[in-house]
Image (cartoon, grey):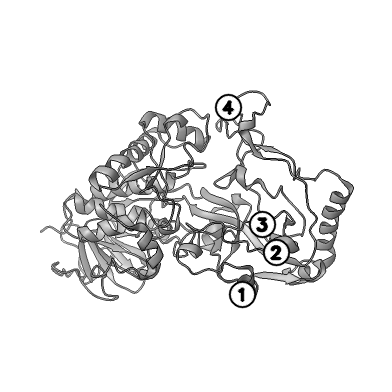
């Protein structure tokens, strides 16, 4: 399969027309060649003896209905088609130009171990006390290991070695089997999502855009799933099965408050798709599915808003220089500001364990004149929603004009603009600057060298190696002299940056959604971050790889079923 990714990227993904001809009309259009089927909600479905929430007629019919158009949804749709499903419809909540979920704006890295047993050992250690049933962990490992063959042989993709996370946690048992890859060796830039989308088009997968799924259509007694209803009232019939691959809830503030209080940051910012608002969680609850891993997530240290004050969509700031501090909601410093390099997906090692990164609510980045004169965004050019979708601000002046960043000649004036008591923020800054003048050590050790071996035993809460000796190979941050923070001053709100959430409907090794009794719900499958295997920590590229493997398994499983509406 030959692809010119550079051309695709420079032309702009939102302007590409490779989906032409595969989009369903916004309302009421049935897939070509499929006969309509009328079923009255007033009468029991033939053979069931009980009513469900069946429509009087279906707007669209297919063998398999897939909810979501990221790596999980596309893999499910492709696998279903390749395994004999004559018709597959994928529902995408976003308009066409914004389609693709978080996969489209991710690093597109695939973690594919070269050994199943090694993968089980490694991930079990990363999960620590957050255990997963052995049979489910085994199925996960077999699935991600099997991605290499499926992607390279069945889909004819070219996988190039990645340079990161091979493994992300060296020294952990099984880590020697962890390998990571990029499609065509390209990091980010939708390098996985584009060829998956092209493959789905080649196979004839139909896509309905602006089709947010909000309700499963099913038999109230047996829970057998028949299809999906969208927000605008359209009904999509899945003769063989439905796959929920609709992502997580990183852009749903209510769900974040409900499920992720353990983060200590009740209002995190999102790096991924703003359309990930937890639709699958609601549908799973509706049918009595079991939820798991609802407080697990992947993060990227602290982020700053990049679109507007009304949006949590964010980007990763990289201040240029060291004349800046981070302050919490009370206007006080709370951490060593440069430790991003020793953080791992929202966790930072401390005394042998990996607690959550502390980014308190209402925190701000306060910059002095040197830092503030340089744009905080721009270091990341290959991923995140504002960058790939070209919908966010990139310069400090744009952020100031949008009311996201503020500039002031004095710290008291900046404090007023940010909502702090002027005296409090001024006192914090004076304490910091006075300590530098006096040559005193920083209260958080800022400026001192930092070592990061990344060797640990999560289950026992201890280092995997004994002793306190540090080798030069583990030096993450070299010692550096501190610099006073002086005007003019700049400030912007920061929060924990969510890459994605992991929670959703619990699924078994066949990607079947389970009820409260751990029994499969008939004809309902899930894939991707919606119900991920990852309970606490994971290796970089693990979410994307799991999305591909569970999507593949779900699509194959749905395609193998006999249609429920056979006379």
Q: SS for tag 3?
A: loop
Residue 240, given in percent of the width and then of the height, sits at: 21, 55
Residue 302, given in percent of the width and then of the height, sits at: 61, 55
Of labels 2 and 1, the one closer to you: 2
Which residue in the structure is indicated by mark 4? 464
Of labels 2 and 4, the one closer to you: 2
Q: Nearer the viewer, residue 441 or 517?
A: 441
Q: Nearer the viewer, residue 89 or 13?
A: 13
Q: If you read the primary sequence from the N terminus, does the residue marked by circle 3 or circle 1 appear first? A: 3
Q: CA distance from mark 1 to mark 4?
A: 48 Å
Decide: few, some or many residues near mark 3? Use Cα within 10 Å; few <14, some 14-19, many ≥20. Answer: some
Q: SS for tag 2?
A: helix
Residue 190, given in percent of the width and then of the height, sits at: 40, 57
Which residue in the structure is indicated by mark 1? 402
Q: CA distance from mark 2 to mark 1?
A: 16 Å
Q: Quadrant of the C terminus?
A: bottom left
Which residue in the structure is indicated by mark 3? 320
């Amino acid at each position: 399969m030959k692809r010119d990714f550079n051309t695709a990227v420079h032309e702009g993904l939102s302007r590409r027309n490779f989906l032409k001809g595969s989009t369903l009309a916004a309302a009421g259009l049935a897939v070509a060649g499929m006969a309509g089927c009328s079923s009255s909600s007033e009468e029991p479905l033939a053979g069931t003896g009980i009513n469900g929430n069946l429509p009087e007629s279906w707007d669209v019919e297919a063998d398999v209905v897939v909810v979501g158009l990221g790596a999980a949804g596309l893999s499910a749709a492709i696998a279903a088609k390749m395994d004999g499903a004559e018709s597959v419809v994928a529902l995408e909540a976003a308009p066409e130009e914004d389609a693709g979920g978080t996969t489209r704006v991710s690093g597109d890295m695939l973690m594919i171990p070269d050994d199943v047993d090694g993968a089980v050992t490694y991930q079990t250690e990363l999960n620590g006390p957050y255990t997963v049933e052995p049979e489910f962990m085994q199925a996960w490992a077999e699935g991600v290991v099997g991605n290499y063959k499926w992607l390279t042989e069945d889909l004819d993709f070219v996988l190039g070695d990645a340079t990161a996370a091979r493994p992300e946690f060296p020294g952990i048992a099984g880590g020697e089997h962890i390998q990571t890859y990029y499609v065509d060796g390209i990091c980010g830039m939708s390098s996985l999502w584009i060829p998956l989308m092209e493959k789905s088009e080649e196979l004839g997968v139909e896509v309905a855009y602006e089709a947010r799924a909000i309700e499963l259509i099913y038999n109230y007694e047996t829970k057998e799933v028949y299809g999906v209803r969208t927000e605008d009232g359209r009904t999509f019939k899945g003769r063989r099965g439905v796959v929920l691959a609709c992502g997580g809830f990183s852009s749903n503030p209510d769900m974040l408050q409900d499920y992720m209080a353990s983060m200590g940051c009740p209002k995190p910012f999102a790096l991924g798709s703003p359309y990930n608002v937890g639709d699958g969680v609601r549908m799973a609850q509706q049918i009595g599915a079991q939820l798991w891993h609802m407080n697990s997530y992947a993060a990227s240290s602290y982020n700053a808003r990049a679109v507007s004050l009304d949006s949590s969509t964010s980007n990763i700031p990289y201040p240029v220089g060291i004349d800046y501090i981070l302050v919490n909601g009370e206007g006080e410093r709370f951490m060593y500001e440069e430790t991003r390099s020793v953080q791992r997906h929202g966790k930072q090692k401390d005394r042998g364990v990996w607690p959550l990164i502390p980014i308190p609510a209402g925190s701000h980045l306060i910059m002095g004149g040197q830092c503030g004169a340089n744009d905080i965004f721009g270091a990341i050019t290959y991923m995140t929603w504002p960058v790939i979708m070209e919908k966010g601000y990139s310069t400090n002046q744009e952020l100031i004009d949008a009311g996201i960043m503020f500039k002031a000649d004095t710290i008291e004036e900046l404090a007023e603009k940010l909502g702090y008591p002027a005296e409090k923020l001024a006192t914090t800054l004076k304490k910091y600057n006075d300590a530098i003048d006096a040559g005193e050590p920083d209260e958080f050790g800022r400026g001192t060298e930092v070592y990061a071996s990344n060797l640990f035993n999560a289950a026992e809460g201890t280092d995997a190696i004994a002793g306190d000796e540090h080798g030069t190979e583990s030096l993450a941050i070299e010692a550096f002299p501190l610099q006073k923070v002086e005007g003019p001053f700049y400030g912007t709100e920061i929060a924990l940056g969510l890459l994605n959430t992991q929670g959703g409907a619990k699924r078994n090794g066949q990607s079947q959604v389970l009820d409260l009794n751990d029994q499969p719900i008939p004809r309902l499958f899930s894939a991707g971050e919606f119900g991920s295997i990852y309970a606490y920590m994971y290796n970089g590229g693990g979410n994307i790889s799991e999305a591909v493997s569970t999507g593949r398994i779900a699509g194959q499983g749905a395609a193998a079923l006999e249609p429920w509406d056979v006379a």
